[in-house]
Amino acid sequence: MTEELKETFTGGAVAVGGGAAPDPLAAKVRTLAPSMTRSMQRVAEAVASDPAACAALTVTGLAERTGTSEATVVRTARLLGYPGYRDLRLALAGLAAQRTSGRSPSVTSDIAVDDPIEAVVAKLARDEQQTLADTAAALDTAQLAAAVTALVDARRIDVYGIGASGLVAQDLAQKLLRIGLVAHAHGDPHVAVTGAVQLRSGDVAVAITHSGATADVIEPLRVAFERGATTVAVTGRPDGPVAQYADHVLTTSTARESELRPAAMSSRTSQLLVVDCLFTGVTQRTYATAAPALSASYEALAHRRTPRQRTTPR
């Protein structure tokens, strides 16, 4: 991504605090920019930095302004989720109206080595808020609903994740187990593939990979896909290799890396939001059985939450 594009999507992002609604177009651009060609990035930079001016341009005009071709402009519009350039222009006009309504831009959350702890807290909070807003804005609710339906009807659910994504995989499996579903998280790629071989139609496999290119996650998902299981990918790169084996793709926000804060931290935040959406959707659909199951698991662990009585020394 170009430095200009980074500045547009970090320092110039629309604020999400103070009750302001997230900016869906800006969220899409931030998420998909790393997968764009340089010429497409120039188009994205133009529409994100000056939506009002771009909304007034024809496809030829925008191509000339960005030094690209009409085909590149159309491809960029389609990558951002619009059927054609006309639809993108309408979205830009709406975005321009929002940006002139008085909302202030957010402050970049880059953390310096000498930042006081108060500034660190404030900057991290802003970044987490932006990550969640971007994920919510870009999440395809039709795909989410379809994934929820598959989980509700599943005979067995396998969840794959490595490293930080493995922690999220464990969180999803543990949540589903608490409401009575048969779910297992696999962080070992050999065990994951061995389990995927046993899947069939009526089962669900969920792959969690921020990059969309983690081989140890893609391989078991491919096996599950070929065995007839319904497959779901939770990824920050919907155009990545993992998507070719996914029946349903749930897109998370692309993390903004910094020297002191690796991408895994922000990516995990957006993944956990998607996991909570999946879990809540399943719980709504299975409330009659999920509620008693949650209550039973809570009661079963209640004694572990009771503080031990300290004995008085003699």
Image (spheres, rainbow, N blue to C red):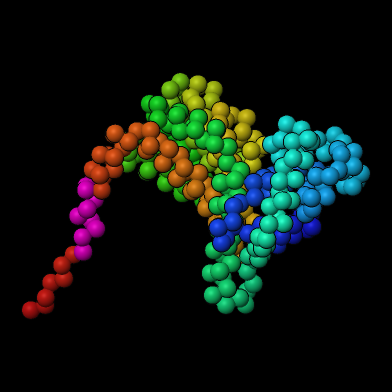
Say if 297 sits above or below 181 in the image.
below
Q: Where residue 298 sits in the image (x, y, percent)?
A: 25, 48
Relative vertical location of residue 261 with respect to residue 296 in this rendering, above or below: below
Above or below residue 202? Residue 140 is: below
Check residue 223 for magenta coloring: no
Report the label total. 0
In-front residue for pair 284/217: 284
Q: Residue at x 58, y 73 (%)?
A: 119
Q: Is residue 304 magenta?
A: yes
Residue name at image x 43 percent, y 26 percent: 203
Q: Is any part of residue 305 visible from this angle?
A: yes
The residue range painted magenta reads 299-307
Is 141 positioned to the left or the right of 176 in the image?
right
Task: In this rendered view, identify the residue nearer to me: 215 or 10.
Answer: 10
Which sits in the foreground, 33 or 141?
A: 141
* Residue 214 position in % (x across, y down): 59, 41
Q: Residue at x 77, y 54 (%)?
A: 49
User: Residue placed at 79% from the left, 50% from the top?
Assistant: 52
Query: In the visual, does 229 lie left or right of 109?
Result: left
- Tell me residue 139's x, y (percent): 57, 41
- Name the image quarter holding residue 137: top right
Magenta highlight: main SS: helix
**Any part of residue 188 in sight:** no
Q: Is residue 15 above or below residue 155?
A: below
